[in-house]
Image (cartoon, rainbow, N blue to C red):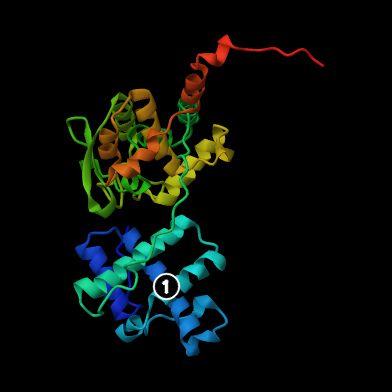
Amino acid sequence: MKNPNFSITSPVIKDFLNYMLNIKGKSPKTVSEYYLDLRTFFRYIKKFKYSEAKNSENFKDIKIDDIDIQMVKSITLTDIYDYFNYLTYERKNSSSTKARKISCLRSFFNFLSNKTHQIDENPCKEIDTPKKKSSLPKFLTLEESLELLNSVTGTYRERDFCILTLFLNCGMRLSELVNMNLSDIRSDNTLRLTGKGNKERIIYLNEACNSAIKNYLKVRPMNGIADRNALFISKQKKRISPKTVQALVYKYLNKANLKNEGYSVHKLRHTAATLMYQHGNVDIRVLKDILGHSNLGTTEIYTHVSNRQIEKAISSNPLAKKYIKKFDEE
């Protein structure tokens, strides 16, 4: 992904975004999300706090190029609470979305207070983060995973099969897969991945992955390629794009009659993690390193037990079969 261009925004916002991109090492995608979150916040501030923007017919027409440090200094904790009421009741944002927006604002005001000392204190410092809904990750069963792999056909079958195999075996992110290079494949059956924040990690390639890569490399285009080091090549002989990968995953989910089950590219990552944990008895700390998580808490969502395990546990109750009472019909 190319570095985002923030030339149209205000200097105070641009400085923060450049700091997150170049000093903190956040990915261009993450920094772009910061920009969008700050744009929404300052559009709200201008519309509801400053008279010149109150009469704007369209929220999206409000410009933020003129946001300066004096305007930032005027923002209070009350303004921020009002903003999150707006996100809740007007924009209907979920708890996870609001949590992300709070994190963005905390980082922004922390940058201005602790890093550049342009404001005296961070108005977000004491604000609570909305509690996220705790839900189990959605994943394909082992049988569904095999059906998905068996559905691969067509002109690009070797490439597409390789992509699905890597997703289901290695649990890599979409961005990690599309950014893979030929030089990332190592001779010792390992693969170098570049994850969030440009953090590199090495993962082991099992027999299925090695076989799929070898079969794909036999038919991978060699001539006229725009990015000669890119591993996965599109029909246009360019590095494959995230949209192309998403499209082919949905195509094969449809062929395997799994389209309406709520699965997606990211659910294949969930699937790999769940299969490794449930069928391979992989230690959660090892799973954390495989997935490239920064903290163990993120990985713990995969320690959920399967429905079969729950059924087995309940069936093991000593009362399950020994005390079954039949009542005569009245």
**Residue at figure coordinates x 27%, y 45% from the top left:** 295
Is residue 275 shown to the viewer in this render? yes
Residue where numbered disc 1 is placed: 80
- Is disc 1 surrounded by few (<14), some (14 to 19) or many (20+) residues within 10 Å? some
Point out residue 133 in the picture as x, y percentages from the top left corner: 47, 49
| Along the line of sight, the residue nearer the viewer: 48 or 227 | 48
Q: Which residue is situated farthest in the bottom direction here? A: 52
Point out residue 306 in the picture as x, y percentages from the top left corner: 46, 28
Q: Which residue is situated farthest in the left direction here? A: 188
The amino acid sitting under disc 1 is Ile
**Residue at figure coordinates x 36%, y 78% from the top left:** 8
Identify whether 311 is placed above or below 140: above
Horizontal relation, residue 118 to residue 265: left or right: left
| Along the line of sight, the residue nearer the viewer: 163 or 72 | 72
User: On the image, which quarter does residue 269 sit in?
Assistant: top left
SS assignment at label 1? helix
Q: Which residue is situated farthest in the right direction here? A: 330
User: On the image, which quarter does residue 186 sit in?
Assistant: top left
Point out residue 104 in the picture as x, y percentages from the top left corner: 35, 65
Point out residue 151 in the picture as x, y percentages from the top left corner: 50, 30
Horizontal relation, residue 315 to residue 223: left or right: right
Identify whether 9 is placed above or below 194: below
Quarter containing the N terminus: bottom left
Quarter containing the C terminus: top right
Identify whether 216 is placed above or below 298: above
| Along the line of sight, the residue nearer the viewer: 323 or 46 | 323
Identify whether 108 is placed above or below 247: below
Is residue 159 shown to the viewer in this render? no
| Along the line of sight, the residue nearer the viewer: 114 or 286 | 114
